[in-house]
Image (tube, coloured by chain):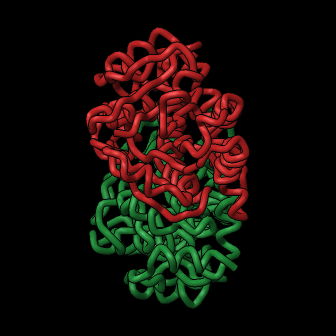
Chain colours: A green, B red
Amino acid sequence: MTVIGLVGAGHMGSGLGWALREGGHDVVTSLAGRSQRTARLVAEAGLRPLPHLAGVLAEAEVILVVTPPGAALDAARDIAALAGPRTAGRLVVDMNAVAPETATAAADLVTAAGFGFVDGSISGPPPTVRPGARLYLSGPRAAEVAALRWTHARPVVVGDRVGAASAVKMSTASVYKGLMGLMTQAVRAAAAHDVLEPVMADLGEDFGTPYEMALAAAKAHRYVAEMREIARSQAAAGLTPSLFEAFAEVWTDVAGRPLAGGDPETVSREITARGVADGLDG
Amino acid sequence: MTVIGLVGAGHMGSGLGWALREGGHDVVTSLAGRSQRTARLVAEAGLRPLPHLAGVLAEAEVILVVTPPGAALDAARDIAALAGPRTAGRLVVDMNAVAPETATAAADLVTAAGFGFVDGSISGPPPTVRPGARLYLSGPRAAEVAALRWTHARPVVVGDRVGAASAVKMSTASVYKGLMGLMTQAVRAAAAHDVLEPVMADLGEDFGTPYEMALAAAKAHRYVAEMREIARSQAAAGLTPSLFEAFAEVWTDVAGRPLAGGDPETVSREITARGVADGLDG
């Protein structure tokens, strides 16, 4: 069965790796330069750690890249730099949350080095947290990635054009993460104006719970680059980039607050709206 | 029973007037300078039209102001200019969607002219469209307004401080109208990138239906000033005003598109996401 290489085995990456392991694939990843936390996530997901990226490329037939949005092009460059006769035609799948033009730039880098390329994106939480994530795939070889033995996640091919899978993610993430940004601002404004109780009673929990807001705060530093990718994607569609540039500003502010201090796994499910507001004040 | 004066008998204003008529109140409003559409809404709601604002102030013990956000201070000035010995102590209720500081400015204008003042705001659709709107009220005399015979809407007193009721609305509207802005941008971006179908399949209808987006487009020109009031309210809370200044830009753009051409009552419930995208393109 196809050996899978994973570049970026964080919260989402190790979750995807686990979903493929459960399907029977051997999943290899490099721990070079990665944290203790990543080493733990890799062990928990049953992935096979290797000392260097070169080793991953030597073994893997399909390489999934799941990095924070701001690191997508560096990852493509690192992979391209290690290309050789043995890696020709192997498939690099960019699963990052980036604008179509960023995906195209990543494609240019790795295809020039002899790799195949599939554009991909992930909508929904890591399969280790909750099953049901949608894996959007596009490009001439998208069907090869969809045909892997995925479990707890559903591949959806959205055509043979690189950029389409990324464009899907930019629109879905703009609503999901945008809404969390709206809720976070609304809670902070309500607390500052001393009307937090009636505001939370009016909004209910349909638009986001305090736990989800605290979880978003823990990921805020990673959201900043993704908001800029959405701004780029909306500008390419002829819309103003100001809206998601402003969301980048919102998450930059959140990332500097006490609530943003922990890892997503450590966020308490018992946190209240008041707890969120207090953790973002100071 | 208390005679109610209504300043601004549009979609929302006539709906509130109807809710008070249903409770048994006599509701008077001036049609001076108003459109045929407003005259029709007033007739349908069973309100008693008068030729001038002066006549409304001569009869009404409680004056509800329900104008677009950008017209709130002009309405307060018009009322203050018509003050006289007979209007001393009568109650002006600013129900507009404005920042707390705008509500305070309206209070200063009308109390200097001898009126009482209650800050108010409305969360939810007009009672004529769907029952259940929350009427937030604050200020020393808020209980008098809550005690009117409201039907199909629920008054909620949020303290005796002018500005509190407006602050509630700024946070709730930031989520409800912000989400509609996010959906509108997402649909436009998805259509431009030719991925509308998978994006709508991923988002579902929990975050807003095409009908709701088309309804928002029909109100877009009125949303612009409200977004600026929210920006002001968030800035007063120590947050960036950029986010809602950007939403003002989003709705300014929408207001200039073919989809924004009709009145809210004329929007088709059958419109599709493709119909929304097409109506916003051109």
- One can see residue A84 in this view: no
> Looking at the picture, how far across and down is residue B108, in whole percent?
72, 48
> Looking at the picture, how far across and down is residue A137, in whole percent?
43, 47
Q: Is residue B100 above or below residue A171?
A: below
Image-quadrant location for residue A235: top right
* Viewer-proximal residue among A145 and B68: B68
> Looking at the picture, how far across and down is residue A82, in whole percent?
67, 66
* Viewer-proximal residue among A252 and B202: A252
Apparent side of residue B69 relative to residue B48 in the rendered image (left or right): right
Residue, x 52% and y 25% (percent of image)? B56
> Looking at the picture, how far across and down is residue A118, in whole percent?
50, 48
Residue, x 61% and y 42% (percent of image)? B88
Image-quadrant location for residue B192: top right
* Viewer-proximal residue among B191 and A56: B191
Residue most extreme to the top: B36
Residue, x 55% and y 20% (percent of image)? B281
Image-quadrant location for residue B152: top left
